Image: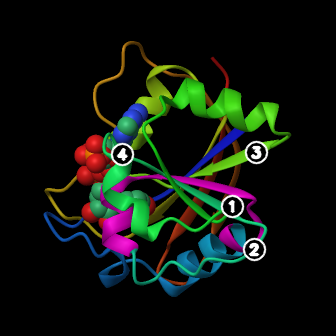
């Protein structure tokens, strides 16, 4: 199973500007375009409950794409569930990947946030990381992930400048 993690961060490694949960206050249009192009073709998109709540009004469900929101309390979201398009799950990343793979899913697009990323990275399930670096510095905020059991090695596949301000899109493969 390919698990592609896509995130955007500041030059100093923050995925949020301090406590502001709205990343569209500081991310570039060019990053949004490449991100939503990936969202448009993804069959399965996985996110943490806090990322879902921060983006609830922007999420456009459509047939053929399943969004899975990880939460320890899926029962609290029963009224928001949409069959085959939006589900809430308390599965571990390993259980979720196993279930989706058995259902024939070849790829998951993992879109954060920090806690959810950590859960996948900690058990070695992430195979690719697409990281946009915006030319801003915040000094505080959440980071891409939290403490991991061991360091991870990556190999750069490509590096593209998305605009004249210097927004960079780095694509890495996880090597171990
Ligand atoms: N810059 C970017 O690219 C980017 C991308 C995504 C998000 N963000 C930002 O990041 C912030 C959210 O990140 P976050 O780290 O605070 O939260 P998060 O990872 O989005 O969500 C954390 C929650 O997800 C649930 N969860 C995660 N792993 C789970 C597991 N293995 N099993 C069951 N439930 C699990 C838990 O929900 P319960 O508490 O319900 O149990 C947990 O509290 C937001 O401000 C968002 O805007 C930035």
Q: How many marks?
A: 4
Q: Which residue lies under the disc numbered 3? A: 107
Location of the C terminus (image quadrant): top right
The first of marks 3 and 2 along the sequence is 2
Residue at position x 46%, y 82% from top? 28
Question: What secondary structure is marked by label 2?
Answer: loop
Q: Which residue lies under the disc numbered 1? A: 84
Q: Which mark is residue 133?
A: none
How far across and down, in percent of the image, does residue 18 sit? 14, 63
Q: CA distance from mark 3 to mark 2?
A: 17 Å
Q: Which mark is residue 63?
A: 2
The first of marks 2 and 4 along the sequence is 2
Which region of the structure is painted magenta? 39-55
Residue at position x 66%, y 69% from top? 39
Indicate yes or no: mark 3 CB to ligand 1 under 8 Å.
Answer: no
- Please name which of the two marks, 1 or 3, marks the residue nearer to the observer: 1
- Residue 114 visible: no
Write down the quadrant of residue 156 in the picture: top right
Is 48 part of what is drawn in magenta?
yes
From the viewer's perspective, is residue 150 above or below residue 108? above
Q: Which residue lies under the disc numbered 4? A: 71
Task: Answer with left or right where residue 43 lies relative to residue 112.
Answer: right
Residue at position x 51%, y 55% from top? 111
Question: What secondary structure is marked by label 4?
Answer: loop
């Amino acid at each position: 199973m390919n698990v592609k993690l896509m995130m955007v961060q500041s030059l100093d490694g923050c995925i949020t500007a301090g406590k502001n949960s709205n990343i569209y206050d500081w991310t570039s249009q060019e990053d949004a375009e490449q991100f939503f192009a990936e969202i448009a073709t993804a069959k399965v998109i996985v996110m943490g409950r806090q990322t879902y709540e921060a983006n609830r009004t922007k999420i456009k469900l459509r047939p053929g794409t399943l969004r899975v929101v990880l939460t320890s309390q899926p029962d609290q979201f029963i009224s928001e569930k949409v069959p085959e398009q939006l589900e809430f799950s308390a599965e571990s990343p390993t259980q979720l990947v196993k279930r989706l793979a058995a259902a024939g899913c070849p790829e998951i697009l993992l879109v954060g946030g920090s806690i959810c990323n950590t859960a996948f990275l900690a058990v070695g399930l992430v195979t690719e990381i697409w990281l946009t670096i915006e030319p801003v510095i915040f000094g505080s905020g959440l980071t891409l992930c939290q403490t991991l059991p061991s360091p991870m090695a990556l190999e750069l596949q490509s590096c593209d400048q998305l605009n004249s301000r210097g927004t960079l899109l780095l694509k890495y493969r996880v090597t171990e």
